[in-house]
Amino acid sequence: MYTFLFEIDSKFYAYNTLSNALIEIAEDTYKILLVNKNRHTPLQEKDLGCDELYQTLKENHMITENDRDEFLLYKSIILAGRSINILNLTIAPTMDCNYSCSYCFENCKRNIYMTEKVISSIIKFIEQYENIKILGIKQIESLYRKMILIPDKNYSFSIISNGFLISPDIIKLFKEMKLQHIQITLDGLKETHNKIKFTKNENDTFSRTIKNIDLLASSAPEIRISIRVNMNKENSSEFITLYSFILQRYKSNPLIEFILLFITSTSSKSSSSCSLLFNRQEKSEFIQQLYYDRGIVTNLCGYPDSSFYRMFYSK
């Protein structure tokens, strides 16, 4: 149910969405698995003629005793990410933004900010839970000041930012909050990034963002930083160069990681921009090429969806 079989350039692969395992297999194995999948018949060790291959496929959940086993595994993965004792909140304190990225949900941005009344309502909502993990950005200080007044609560803070407005004062607040993690976005190399992200008074936002990452890393080395690259077909040719730049610049800091985000369409309507987006097969081909040509391994993040991948060299 959760295993997909496909062929690319006369090579055959099996991919399982539960284990995130991708295995290259022989053509005869591919045909055997395909027949069993279409017929919904159980696969036996003798069918493959190789005990080691059978065990490998079984360990990666590509073959199971029955569909119920797969469903129960899927259910356990979902439930493992939940807890009755932990509340995860993603808070958008504003629908405004200093950028106008075409792919963002804020492209129809409005100059609306969270009011103190809304903040007070959030605090009342939080009070019923024993442990809190909350994600937010900007105006978080007002929320934070009120949250710490609630007795017997444990908090963990993480934010997503374009990195443009990070300053010594903001870093001071981060340290006071004991911020654990921040995700900062880039949209390619300097020229490409600056075409997408710019303000009325700043054209080179790429350099300012990198400068602010440097400032944050040196001023608050305890904070884990994820540098997320938003990628479509227009800037994909720059990926290796950008990845190498980030790797070399921050290779001495184990708390700085590189995340790749494939920009995909969430609309059923076709448009000229859709031709720049990756579909599922194109994402798979790009990931395989990274590994075979560059030795770069991708690891599915799991949050917030399956378009996010962590990157690291395998050799």
Image (spheres, helix red, strand yellow):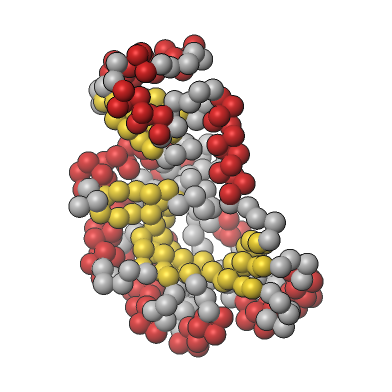
Q: Nearer the viewer, residue 94 or 60?
A: 60
Q: Is residue 123 left or right of residue 139?
A: right
Does 21 sit above or below residue 217?
Answer: above
- In the rendered image, which quarter is residue 260 located in? bottom left
Q: Is residue 188 left or right of residue 201?
A: left
Does 10 sit above or below residue 262?
Answer: above
Percent position of residue 34, x then y = 40, 17
Q: Nearer the viewer, residue 84 or 176?
A: 84
Percent position of residue 297, x then y = 30, 48
Q: Is residue 290 left or right of residue 96?
A: left
Q: Nearer the viewer, residue 105 or 145?
A: 145
Residue at 46% x, 66% y: name it. Answer: 183
- In the rendered image, which quarter is residue 220 located in? bottom left
Q: Is residue 102 visible?
A: yes
Residue at 24% x, 60% y: name it. Answer: 244
Q: Nearer the viewer, residue 301 or 233?
A: 301
Residue at 56% x, 58% y: name it. Answer: 107
Residue at 48% x, 78% y: name it. Answer: 165
Percent position of residue 294, x then y = 21, 48
